[in-house]
Image (cartoon, helix red, strand yellow):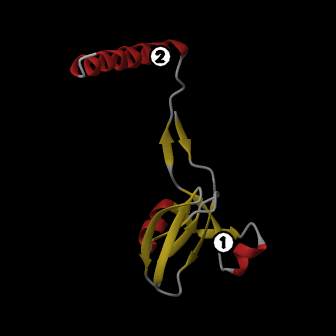
Amino acid sequence: AIYYKCPMVHARVATVAGKLTTVVGGDIETTNTVEIGDVIVANPAGEQYAMPTDNFKARYIHDNPLPAADEMMAVEGFERFQPKGKIWGHLVTQEEMDNFLKRHLTRRTRLRRHEMKRLGS
């Protein structure tokens, strides 16, 4: 089945060039250069990243933004946008899961035995 990506993001156009550090779970994931006109996107979890305007327009419905969800984001110039993304999903049956685990665990066991032989155990 095809599913649509649902969580909306906050986004705004960068008015100043500089650096943007993306923090995920308290850890720095990356630091990127932001050019004037790039779009700064804030995901629902709060991490922010920048992308060129063309990429943003390809990924999000950009012509009808909604107001920011909270006052702080609004003050910073953010608005909310719906993603265009779609994903293919498959509901895994118990039989499929059992077969996957059987293959995976069997392979893992073989690898462990091989490692033990190599180590002389």
**Residue under the point 49% across and 42% down:** 87
- Residue 116 x %, y %: 29, 18
Could one spot residue 99 in this view of the protein? Answer: yes
**Residue under the point 37% across and 15% down:** 103
Which numbered marker is on residue 25? none
**Residue placed most toward the observer, 19 or 40:** 19
Sequence-wise, the earlier of marks 2 and 1 is 1
Q: Amino acid at mark 2?
A: Glu
- Residue 22 x %, y %: 51, 66
Q: Amino acid at mark 1?
A: Glu
Q: Are marks 2 and 1 in contact (CB under 8 Å)?
A: no
Q: Quadrant of residue 43?
A: bottom right
**Residue under the point 50% across and 29% down:** 90
Query: On the image, numbered disc 2 is attached to which residue?
Result: 96
Gap in angstroms between the C-alphas marked 2 and 1: 42 Å
Query: On the image, numbered disc 1 is attached to which residue?
Result: 79
User: Helix, strand, or loop for circle 2?
Assistant: helix
Please rate how many residues cluster around mark 2, counting C-alpha atoms within 10 Å: few if below 14, some from 14 to 19, many from 20. Answer: few
- Residue 111 x %, y %: 30, 20
